[in-house]
Amino acid sequence: MILWVVILAVLTILSYLSDIGVLTFLKDIRIPFLNASIMSILLLLCAAVMLIRVLLKIKQKEKEMLGTKITALERELQAFKEKVE
Protein backbone atom coordinates (compact mmCIF):
# COMPACT_ATOMS: atom_id res chain seq x y z
CA MET A 1 0.00 0.00 0.00
CA ILE A 2 2.86 2.34 0.80
CA LEU A 3 4.29 1.67 -2.65
CA TRP A 4 1.06 2.90 -4.27
CA VAL A 5 1.14 6.07 -2.15
CA VAL A 6 4.75 6.73 -3.19
CA ILE A 7 3.90 6.14 -6.87
CA LEU A 8 0.89 8.45 -6.58
CA ALA A 9 3.01 11.15 -4.93
CA VAL A 10 5.68 10.92 -7.64
CA LEU A 11 3.07 11.08 -10.40
CA THR A 12 1.42 14.06 -8.74
CA ILE A 13 4.74 15.91 -8.55
CA LEU A 14 5.49 15.10 -12.19
CA SER A 15 2.02 16.26 -13.18
CA TYR A 16 2.49 19.53 -11.32
CA LEU A 17 5.87 20.10 -12.95
CA SER A 18 4.30 19.37 -16.30
CA ASP A 19 1.48 21.86 -15.67
CA ILE A 20 3.80 24.70 -14.72
CA GLY A 21 5.94 24.08 -17.79
CA VAL A 22 9.11 22.57 -16.32
CA LEU A 23 8.58 19.18 -17.99
CA THR A 24 7.11 20.14 -21.35
CA PHE A 25 7.59 16.70 -22.92
CA LEU A 26 5.06 15.19 -20.50
CA LYS A 27 2.44 17.73 -21.52
CA ASP A 28 2.73 16.73 -25.17
CA ILE A 29 2.17 13.02 -24.58
CA ARG A 30 -1.57 12.46 -24.94
CA ILE A 31 -3.82 9.45 -25.32
CA PRO A 32 -5.74 10.06 -28.56
CA PHE A 33 -9.10 8.39 -27.95
CA LEU A 34 -9.45 9.83 -24.41
CA ASN A 35 -7.98 13.25 -25.21
CA ALA A 36 -6.15 13.24 -21.90
CA SER A 37 -2.52 13.51 -20.91
CA ILE A 38 -0.66 10.39 -19.89
CA MET A 39 -0.10 11.85 -16.42
CA SER A 40 -3.84 12.26 -15.84
CA ILE A 41 -4.51 8.67 -16.85
CA LEU A 42 -1.70 7.35 -14.63
CA LEU A 43 -2.99 9.37 -11.66
CA LEU A 44 -6.49 8.05 -12.24
CA LEU A 45 -5.29 4.44 -12.46
CA CYS A 46 -3.20 4.70 -9.29
CA ALA A 47 -6.07 6.24 -7.35
CA ALA A 48 -8.45 3.53 -8.61
CA VAL A 49 -6.04 0.74 -7.65
CA MET A 50 -5.62 2.23 -4.18
CA LEU A 51 -9.40 2.49 -3.73
CA ILE A 52 -9.94 -1.12 -4.83
CA ARG A 53 -7.17 -2.32 -2.53
CA VAL A 54 -8.64 -0.48 0.46
CA LEU A 55 -12.10 -1.89 -0.24
CA LEU A 56 -10.73 -5.42 -0.46
CA LYS A 57 -8.82 -4.97 2.80
CA ILE A 58 -12.00 -3.75 4.53
CA LYS A 59 -13.86 -6.87 3.40
CA GLN A 60 -10.97 -9.06 4.54
CA LYS A 61 -10.96 -7.34 7.95
CA GLU A 62 -14.73 -7.95 8.31
CA LYS A 63 -14.20 -11.65 7.61
CA GLU A 64 -11.42 -11.81 10.20
CA MET A 65 -13.65 -10.15 12.79
CA LEU A 66 -16.47 -12.58 12.07
CA GLY A 67 -14.07 -15.51 12.34
CA THR A 68 -12.87 -14.42 15.77
CA LYS A 69 -16.47 -13.85 16.88
CA ILE A 70 -17.44 -17.37 15.76
CA THR A 71 -14.50 -18.85 17.65
CA ALA A 72 -15.46 -16.98 20.82
CA LEU A 73 -19.09 -18.06 20.52
CA GLU A 74 -18.05 -21.69 19.99
CA ARG A 75 -15.97 -21.52 23.19
CA GLU A 76 -18.93 -20.05 25.08
CA LEU A 77 -21.23 -22.77 23.76
CA GLN A 78 -18.76 -25.49 24.73
CA ALA A 79 -18.42 -24.03 28.22
CA PHE A 80 -22.21 -23.81 28.54
CA LYS A 81 -22.62 -27.44 27.43
CA GLU A 82 -20.03 -28.57 29.97
CA LYS A 83 -21.76 -26.57 32.69
CA VAL A 84 -25.17 -28.11 31.88
CA GLU A 85 -23.84 -31.67 32.00
Image: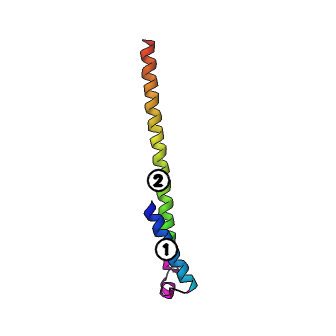
Task: Residue at 48% x, 79% y: name it.
Answer: 38
- Which image quarter holds the N terminus? bottom left
Task: Residue at 43% x, 64% y: name it.
Answer: 3
The boundaries of the magenta stretch are 21-41
Q: Height in image: 85 above or below 48?
A: above
| Depth check, front residue: 24 or 53 | 24
Disc 1 to disc 2, how far (Cα)? 24 Å
* Residue under numbered circle 1: 11
Q: What amino acid is at disc 1?
A: Leu
- Where does residue 5 sit, x and y in percent of width and height? 48, 64
Kindly tell me whether residue 35 is visible in this rendering.
no
Circle 2 crowding by C-alpha within 10 Å: few under 14, some 14–19, many from 20:
few
Q: Does the magenta-highlighted stretch encompass residue 15?
A: no
Q: Does the magenta-highlighted stretch encompass residue 34?
A: yes
Q: Height in image: 65 above or below 75?
A: below
Label for residue 56? 2
| Depth check, front residue: 21 or 62 | 21
Task: Residue at 45% x, 61% y: name it.
Answer: 2
Label for residue 57? none
Kindly tell me whether residue 22 is visible in this rendering.
yes
Give the structural element (helix, strand or loop) at label 1.
helix
Give the structural element (helix, strand or loop) at label 2.
helix
Task: Residue at 48% x, 40% y: name it.
Answer: 65
Q: Height in image: 14 above or below 44?
A: below
Name, please, the residue furthest toward the top: 85
Q: What amino acid is at disc 2?
A: Leu
- Where does residue 40 sit, x and y in percent of width and height? 52, 76
- Which image quarter holds the C terminus? top left
First in sequence, mark 1 or 2: give its number.
1
